[in-house]
Image (tube, helix red, strand yellow):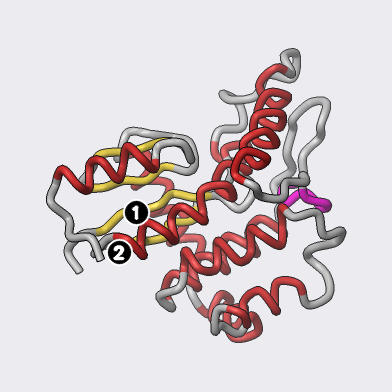
């Protein structure tokens, strides 16, 4: 399929979570491939430039706005416990070892390679952000994967055999080349559409380019 929307997406981003339902609808409505390109959260990609420990307005606003947007969309929203990123809430510092976010991001890479990237992002995000305590334990993600026809065990095996870090690095570079840094960013024919509230603008562009509707 020639028509592709690349979606640069993070498992720690509340706005990435909030856009997944619209991405599934986009794929249902248009003759277009919606391709998941998982990236690490910006807290890990741009440690020294985004968060200022002396100014808490940005993170406070993000949490407040994401909760409000979720309420508007009728979606559950609880900040994940555990947080997919190990981060000091006061200093915003992050250690190098980040097992949870690499696990999730790697699974996203494998899911896309199996043709179900957006489906897995949607299913996994619903588990992570709906308020399940210890969402990383028990069989929560395994069941989410099973519900979309995937095996979490097989995905983990494939993740260890593949060079997922190289794939994630490629996604980081592609996001930069598209002219943006944030998530979710949807890119169609080289044009970036940043934010979960830009889906309608993207649809307008797809219509303008004459993409067939299903």
Asked if 165 appears above or below 89 in the picture, the reply is below
Q: Nearer the viewer, mark 1 or mark 2?
A: 2
The tally of labels here is 2
From the top left corner, tell me how far across and down residue 76 is, in percent.
72, 50
Q: Look at the numbered disc 2 and give the secondary structure of its residue.
A: strand
Determine which quarter of the picture holds residue 70. Answer: top right
Farthest right residue in view: 133
In front here: 192 or 38?
A: 192
Residue 132 seen anywhere in this rendered image of the structure: yes
In front here: 101 or 58?
A: 58
Image quadrant for the C terminus?
bottom left
What residue is pinned by disc 2?
33
What residue is pinned by disc 1?
6
Q: Residue at 59% of width from left, 86% of height from top?
A: 154
Say which label, 1 or 2, has the lower sequence index. Answer: 1
Residue 97 seen anywhere in this rendered image of the structure: no
In front here: 79 or 177?
A: 79
What span is colored magenta in the figure?
80-85
Q: Residue at 68% of width from left, 23% of height from top?
A: 61
Q: Mark 1 packing: few (<14 Cα in 10 Å), some, or many (20+)?
A: many
Asked if 64 appears above or below 19 in the picture, the reply is above
Image side of residue 64 versus residue 169, left or right? right
Prevalent SS, magenta region: loop
Asked if 126 appears above or below 71 in the picture, the reply is below
Q: Residue at 67% of width from left, 33% of height from top?
A: 68
Determine which quarter of the picture holds residue 25. Answer: bottom left
Determine which quarter of the picture holds residue 51. Answer: top right
């Amino acid at each position: 399929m020639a028509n592709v929307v690349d979606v640069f997406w993070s498992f720690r981003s509340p706005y990435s979570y909030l856009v997944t339902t619209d991405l599934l609808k986009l794929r249902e409505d248009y003759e277009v491939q919606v391709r998941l390109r998982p990236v690490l959260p910006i807290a890990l990609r741009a440690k020294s430039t985004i968060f200022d420990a002396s100014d808490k307005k940005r993170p406070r606003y993000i949490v407040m706005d994401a909760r409000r947007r979720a309420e508007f969309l009728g979606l559950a929203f609880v900040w994940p416990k555990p947080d997919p990123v190990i981060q000091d809430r006061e200093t915003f510092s992050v250690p190098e070892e980040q097992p949870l976010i690499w696990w999730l991001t790697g699974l996203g890479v494998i899911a896309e390679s199996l043709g179900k990237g957006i489906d897995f992002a949607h299913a996994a995000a619903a588990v992570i952000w709906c308020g399940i305590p210890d969402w990383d334990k028990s069989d929560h993600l395994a069941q989410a994967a099973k519900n979309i026809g995937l095996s979490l065990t097989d995905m983990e095996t494939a993740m260890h055999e593949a060079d997922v870090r190289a794939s994630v690095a490629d996604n980081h570079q592609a996001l930069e080349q598209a002219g943006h840094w944030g998530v979710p960013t949807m890119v169609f024919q080289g044009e970036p559409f940043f934010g979960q509230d830009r889906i309608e603008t993207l649809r307008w562009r797809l219509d303008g380019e004459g993409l067939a509707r299903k």
